[in-house]
Amino acid sequence: MVKPWWRGQGMPRRRRVVAGTAVAGTTLLGLSLSTKPGSSKFYGITSVVAGIWLAGGLASGPLHRGHTVRGNRRPVMGPVPVGVGAFGAFAATTVVAR
């Protein structure tokens, strides 16, 4: 039987880093959204939020990029159409909203 992550060896380092980054980042993000946009306090808090997300991403370490079913090649062309489609959807939504 496999032990849950909260028992046995303890929580792995990456999960602790991600959890801490998520809690700190979302807390400050909520605080930044409650301040007046354009104020110096708003820019300061949002800069700290960006720094927290950057530091957390770097501290969590490299991720495995994955492999395709056909060997050891990394999937590159799959995410490109998804990104282009997401950009198109957001751009179209912006045009409709205006």
Image (cartoon, rainbow, N blue to C red):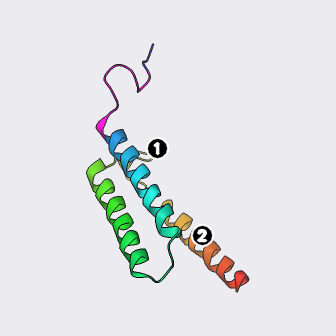
Looking at the image, is 94 positioned above or below residue 52? below
Looking at the image, is 58 positioned above or below residue 3? below
Magenta residues span 4-13
Q: Which residue is mark 1?
A: 69
- Return the residue nearer the eye: 65 or 27: 27
In the picture as drawn, the residue positioned furthest to the top comes out as 1
Q: Is residue 87 visible?
A: yes
Kindly identify the residue that appears in the image at 34 percent across and 60 percent down. 52
What is the number of the mark on residue 85? 2
Horizontal and vertical percent position of residue 54: 32, 62
- Return the residue nearer the eye: 28 or 50: 28
Callout 2: helix, strand or loop?
A: helix
Q: Identify residue type, mark 2.
A: Gly
Callout 1: helix, strand or loop?
A: loop
C-alpha span from label 2 to label 1 = 24 Å
Looking at the image, is 46 positioned above or below residue 5? below
Kindly identify the residue that appears in the image at 32 percent across and 65 percent down. 51
